[in-house]
Amino acid sequence: MTEIHDANSYFGSLARTAERLPFETIDQIAGILLRAYDAGQMVYLFGNGGSAALASHFACDLGKGTLNGNGKRFRVLALTDNIPLMTAWANDRGYEDIFAEQLANLVRPQEVAFAISASGNSPNVLRGLAVARAAGAVTVGLGGFQGGKMKELCDVCMVVPSDNMQIIEDLHLCAAHALFTAIKARICQAAGAVA
């Protein structure tokens, strides 16, 4: 782990890690999301803490920011946004089931379950992915460290090559913005519009 003791060392570490991101994997995920859009299939986003905030942020970007005048909408839902439902499942079944139980109601074959977990080992994220896989969904992840157990449950998983939680979360946001920007450009290109 690189020692970080000031802004310069933090941003230096961030830049070095960004250079080592698996860009081809990010592009592969963009392709999966674009196929879901083209087919009118749902994308479900979920994670904990900062990853929950990113799930909401990314759902907002995809749901609103991809409109290009052709009327077609990106079908996306952050499972982190319905707090009453999450707390009901947490209270009645356990926190480990807050995503799995929502997905059991919603997910269908070929839809996309998109998990975000820096450690890749959050039990509720793993259970959500397992339910999605059993339903025939395409499973995608953003991880860190070595990818954790989540990596095995994902059809495609982009792992930030770092063991620093803040660096991982920063680059998850960058990856989400790269995905959104690439997807929006392809949607606009297909529609003959300007991104």
Image (cartoon, grey):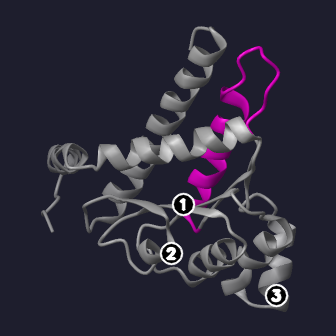
Measure the C-alpha gap from mark 3 to mark 1.
21 Å
Counting residues from the start of the chain, the first of labels 2 and 3 encountered is: 3
The image quadrant where one finds the N terminus is: bottom left
Residue type for callout 2: Leu
Measure the C-alpha gap from mark 2 to mark 3.
26 Å
Residue annotated with mark 1: 51
The residue depicted at 30 percent of the width and 70 percent of the height is 145
Tell me which corner region of the image, top left, top right, bottom left or bottom right, holds residue 101: bottom right
- Whether the residues at callouts 2 and 3 have beta carbons within 8 Å, the answer is no
Which region of the structure is painted magenta? 48-74
Measure the C-alpha gap from mark 2 to mark 1.
18 Å
The secondary element bearing badge 2 is classed as: helix
The residue depicted at 43 percent of the width and 51 percent of the height is 172
Residue 60 position, x and y percent, is: 69, 40
Q: Nearer the viewer, mark 2 or mark 3?
A: 2
Residue 112 position, x and y percent, is: 65, 56
Residue type for callout 3: Asn
